[in-house]
Image (tube, rainbow, N blue to C red):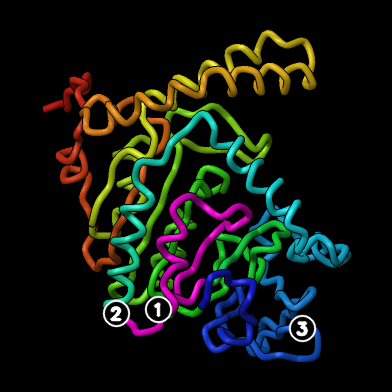
Amino acid sequence: MYQQGSTQSYEAHLSILCCPSCQSSLKAQGDNLSCENRDCGKTFPIIQGRPVLISEEGSLSSIDDFMHLPPAALATPQHPLWSKAEAFYRKFKSLSSVNLSAEKSFETFAELVMQSSSAPRVLVVGVGTQGKGMHKITSHDSIQLINTDISPSRNALLFSDGHDLPFKEGTIDGVIIQAVLEHVLDPLQCVREIHRVLKKTGIVYSEIPFMQQGHSGRHDFTRFTHLGHRRLFRHFEEVDSGVVAGPGTSMAWALEYFVASFAPSRKMMKVASFITRTTGFWLKYFDYLFSNSPAAIDGASCIYFLGRKSDQVLTDKELISQYRGTQDSCYTPSR
């Protein structure tokens, strides 16, 4: 079973890997992968069995960030108490939110990618923490997960930047990018790269926040409405889209940050957030009532898009005709 990309060797996918700078083929040379393009000639180190395929010209990360990692940074923890603690932490982090879409969407995603290949390659961009609903993908023995991340992560098969994916054009059957695009500097460039590496009928699943306060500190840049997210994927045919988490989750996030704003220090802010999260978690359950409400699309905490690569481009007039909320337009085009 290809349950975790990190259980495979990158060598299983070497034929589809490419230089993130010039997209030429790579060859193994000792503890490095080298670009076969003589005009480029870049080399990329293999750290603890995992290539660092980062084009430093357009990335906030550098190869040096990975050169002196302690073995424990990428090792898979074996102690059951660590696994339980990690599971508890993930559960606490999601205490005030729900995910209404992932399980159903991943079931559809798996069906679609397996129609195109008996052993489909599915690229996961940003796998520091496994997203909700992923068990619907990992339960399929035939699906080959290729887990990637820009930061050191024991779940990653290789390290790369979403702005310059190190995969040859048209070699990937499906791409999953959950709660990542808000953390990249140029979401449009990342989506262009997703489109490039996907096969002709490749599938993409994306989740991105809308009504959420800032998180991840300095590495949080963007929010998208439902239509804004759809326009980002305008080179894809829509299979499904909608609300991941609705106004109830939006309210829980807002309450947590509202209370934390009264705290005089960062330490007290964390205490206030902890208290608010553990006492206001019930707000998220309203999302199960709101999930089919047109107003939920306007107040959603997070939205999703499931689509298929297309040669057609969604026009902006077609885009706005797909609005599903309840707000009246305040824009009147000039005649």
Write the start and end of the magenta stretch as one range. Answer: 117-145
Q: Amino acid at mark 2?
A: Ser
Q: As shown in the figure, which amino acid type bears the numbered disc 1?
A: Pro
Instruction: Give the image location of residue 205, x and y in percent.
Output: 38, 57
Marking on residue 32: 3
**Which mark is drawn over residue 116?**
2
Q: Secondary structure at mark 2?
A: helix
Rate crowding at label 2 as few (under 14), some (14 to 19) or many (20 or more) other CA atoms within 10 Å. some
Evaluate if marks 1 and 2 touch, with contact meaning CB atoms under 8 Å apart: yes
The residue to which callout 1 is attached is 120
Measured Cα–Cα span from mark 3 to mark 2: 33 Å
Under tag 1, what secondary structure?
loop
Q: Secondary structure at mark 3?
A: strand
Q: Nearer the viewer, residue 82 or 319?
A: 82
Q: Quadrant of residue 245?
A: top left
- Magenta highlight on residue 89: no
